[in-house]
Image (tube, rainbow, N blue to C red):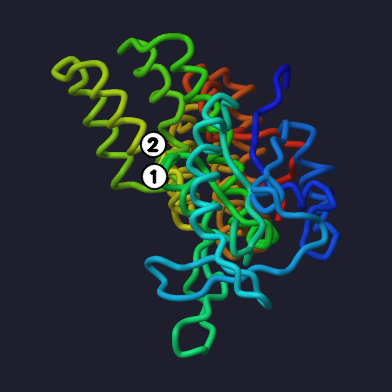
């Protein structure tokens, strides 16, 4: 890649010693593998509101709808201080051109969900959302976000990174200028990728683009963007991928011999049983695209939605 993708991340995940105990939560996957493609913008809410390192640990208390952020021993309430800073920080982050954010899970400031919340009864629950994470997600509702712990799940990791690269391509389209022609081209290249995420949203987006001339351009792009990110957040399944693979194979029905078609179908069955990873049938399809020179398929993002070096389809 000529240009790295701008990605926000909790500073402790990048190895910065900003945690309450003076340590870090260095994530080698972020700083090793992903840093080849992402340019990280570190954020540590606690340090950025002026708290020292080390410091007293924080916790969420009260009701899930309006939790309070307090120090665990002295009980100092930092809610307004954190929220005021966060409201200003998200505006500053608009200028960074972020295409995603990776939060530190279970953090009272940065956890996306399932943060420990000490309710009035005194019994902790897993209903909390970190104060900064909540304000960030409200301010950037379409931006791909994920937590560090969930990135250890191969399916969640691939889906998040796929969303990020898709969002970057969308941003590049907007930077080039909003025209119906560019939108039609973008949609054409992403059709099969969208189909792998949601058949229903794929249909809605197709109808929206087909009716594009009847809508103001601004409204058309806003509605398309919302559907794009809504669809991309839905996890693909083996069944959905098989549907796309069968669709792809249909383009070669006049080119393949009976034996070649049977070989492809057997590979699809092996993938369906979990005997081989998705990269195997996709590699075979890519070979056919080059061999039989299918220009429409050659431009399909589905066949390489992210760098193969990330090995996201190899699991």
Kindly indicate whether the residue at mark 1 contacts the one at mark 2 (C-beta within 8 angstroms).
Answer: yes
Marking on residue 283: none
In this rendering, the answer to whether 246 lies above or below 6 is: below
Write down the quadrant of residue 307 in the picture: top right
In this rendering, the answer to whether 46 lies above or below 56 is: above
Residue bearing mark 2: 228
Mark 1: secondary structure: helix
In this rendering, the answer to whether 190 lies above or below 85 is: above
Which residue appears at 63% of the width and 63% of the height? 107
Q: Position of residue 68 (x, y in %)?
A: 49, 67
- The answer to whether residue 74 is left or right of residue 160 is right
Which residue appears at 36% of the width and 31% of the height? 225
Marking on residue 231: 1
In which quadrant is the C terminus drawn? bottom right
Q: Position of residue 120 (x, y in %)?
A: 44, 85
Cα distance in 3D space between marks 2 and 1 = 5 Å
> Which residue occupies the foreground of this view, 85 or 11?
85
Which residue appears at 54% of the width and 42% of the height? 261
Which residue appears at 58% of the width and 33% of the height? 165
Q: Residues within 10 Å of mark 1 (few under 14, many from 20)?
A: many
> Which residue occupies the foreground of this view, 210 or 39?
39
- The answer to whether residue 142 is left or right of residue 208 is right
Q: Position of residue 274 (x, y in %)?
A: 63, 63
Residue positioned most to the left: 214
């Amino acid at each position: 890649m000529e240009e790295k993708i701008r990605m926000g991340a909790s500073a402790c995940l990048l190895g910065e010693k900003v945690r309450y105990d003076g340590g870090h939560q260095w994530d080698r996957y972020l700083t090793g593998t992903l840093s080849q493609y992402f340019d990280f913008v570190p954020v540590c809410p606690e340090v950025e509101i002026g708290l020292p390192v080390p410091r007293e640990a924080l916790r969420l208390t009260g009701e899930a709808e309006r939790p309070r952020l307090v120090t665990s021993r002295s009980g100092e309430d930092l809610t307004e201080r954190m929220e005021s800073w966060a409201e200003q920080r998200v505006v500053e982050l608009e200028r960074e051109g972020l295409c995603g954010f990776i939060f530190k899970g279970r953090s009272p400031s940065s956890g996306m969900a399932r943060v420990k919340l000490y309710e009035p009864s005194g019994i902790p629950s897993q209903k909390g959302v970190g104060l900064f994470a909540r304000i960030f997600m409200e301010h950037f509702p379409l931006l791909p976000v994920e937590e560090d712990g969930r990135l250890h799940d191969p399916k969640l990791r691939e889906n998040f990174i796929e969303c990020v690269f898709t969002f970057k391509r969308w941003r590049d389209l907007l930077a080039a200028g909003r025209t119906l022609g560019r939108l039609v081209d973008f949609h054409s290249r992403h059709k099969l990728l969208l189909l792998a995420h949601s058949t229903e949203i794929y249909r809605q987006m197709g109808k929206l683009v087909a009716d594009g001339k009847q809508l103001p351009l601004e409204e058309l792009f806003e509605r398309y963007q919302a559907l794009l990110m809504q669809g991309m957040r839905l996890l693909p399944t083996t069944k959905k991928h098989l549907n796309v693979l069968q669709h792809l194979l249909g383009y070669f029905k006049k080119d393949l011999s009976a034996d070649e078609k049977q070989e492809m179908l057997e590979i699809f069955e092996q993938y369906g049983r979990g005997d081989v990873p998705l990269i195997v049938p996709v590699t075979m399809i890519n070979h056919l695209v080059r061999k039989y020179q299918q220009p429409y398929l050659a431009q399909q993002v589905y066949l390489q939605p992210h760098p193969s070096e990330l090995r996201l389809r190899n699991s």
